[in-house]
Image (cartoon, rainbow, N blue to C red):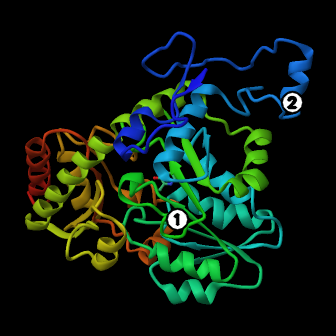
Amino acid sequence: MSNASDSKPFWQPETELIHAGILRSQWGETSEAMFLTQGYIYRSAEQAEARFKNEDPGFQYSRFSNPTVSMFEERLRIFEGAEACRATATGMAAVTAAILSYLKTGDHIVSGRALFGSCRYIVETLCPRFGIECTLIDGRDLHAWEAAVKPNTRMFFFETPSNPTLELVDIEAVCALGKKHGILTVVDNVFATPMLQRPLKLGADIVVYSTTKHIDGQGRCLGGAVLASDDFVTKYLQDWVRQTGPSMSPFNAWIMLKGLETLPIRVKAQCAAAARLAELLAQLKGVTQVLYPGRADHPQAALAAKQMPGGGQIITFEVEGGKAGAFRCVNALRLICISNNLGDAKSLVTHPATTTHQRIGPEARAQLGITDGMIRLSVGLESYEDLAGDLANAVAAVSSQS
Ligand SMILES: *Cc1c(COP(=O)(O)O)cnc(C)c1O
């Protein structure tokens, strides 16, 4: 197999997403091949021995690596500008691998508390079960990060923008604080996508993705990825991934490779539509709040402008009438589907208080600013006019007496 990205000139990012990392077989296929194989055949006992001693480059077993998965890892690695990338079966496998491959009993992790539900479970519930202390803080508050640092703090973890209230964390400032104290910073970059935010360039040590979201982009397969330095991957992540087995399937890697090819045009179109829809929602009677990082009235608009060259494709808005009002709105939608997923070509809404953030309880919801009237909208690729019409009708239903 030949690697087309050897000794080639530097391409623009959109070009890399279509050509980088390709491993062509002897057949010269145009599209990336899907290698549905568990194992690999050696020509001789000597070659098998050399392969296991890492003296003969190649594949051994698909829990370790697979050509299709490698193509995906390489393409994402080049786009993100990371030294190394490992793909995983889901986004949660990526988050778990990044955190648990590094931390051990007696260590301390500090995390922004506005987190995707399962991420919150990992840091708040799972880590302490293995003797890893966890402190959850308001990630927007730089002093809170500083105040939480202890001699045994070894990791910072946060997502920005956060789910569902789209709070931001100052990546550059938190990473600088981490560096000062020898703490590794892990950024969950799912909401921003690699199109809108480059945490590694802002000083992050590790970036994690749920590729289930925008990288697939069409709601098909689960997947995840960890991007980090060669040193981190060699010392910590590689053995974790090889031995505990959260490997991405070659089929899913093939879907993700194809997803990367269209990521820029999809995300650009979704962000443009989201910016217009946020504007529309803010003008509708019955909408009491619109949270969108691209709007001037976002509480952290200046930070958004500094670290994200676009507002993203998620909008969170609040309608009057609490839960009943939000349910009337959601139930009146005819085009936009009710689903807790995001980043799909289909526009999706969810009511966080009764779904994704039900488990954390009313106090934690209040602390995160998640109200009963809040609705999270993931903007898809449908026509803007159809989405705008559907939303306007649904919001009008909030105050109608029926
Ligand atoms: C979806 C998501 C995850 C988890 O990814 P899965 O692929 O569902 O395991 C983690 N973080 C964020 C911000 C997400 O949106």
Q: Secondary structure at mark 1?
A: loop
Q: Quadrant of the N terminus?
A: top right
- Residue 135 sits above or below residue 335 on the image: below
Q: Position of residue 325 (x, y in %)?
A: 21, 61
- Residue 359 sits above or below residue 250 on the image: below
10 Å crowding of disc 2: few (<14), some (14-19), many (20+): few
Rendered image: mark on residue 52: 2
The residue tagged 1 is 360
2 or 1: mark nearer the eye: 2
Q: Position of residue 388 (x, y in %)?
A: 11, 49
Q: Secondary structure at mark 2?
A: helix
| Quarter of image, res 293 | bottom left
Residue type at mark 2 is: Phe
Residue 175 seen in this snapshot: yes
10 Å crowding of disc 1: few (<14), some (14-19), many (20+): few
Q: Residue at the location (48% across, 69% down)?
A: 202
**Of callouts 2 and 1, the N-terminal one:** 2
- Residue 344 sits above or below residue 360 on the image: above
Q: Residue at the location (59% across, 87% down)?
A: 146
Q: Nearer the viewer, residue 179 or 272?
A: 179
Relative to 348, 190 lies left or right: right
Mark 2–mark 1 CB contact (< 8 Å): no
Q: Position of residue 323 (x, y in %)?
A: 29, 62
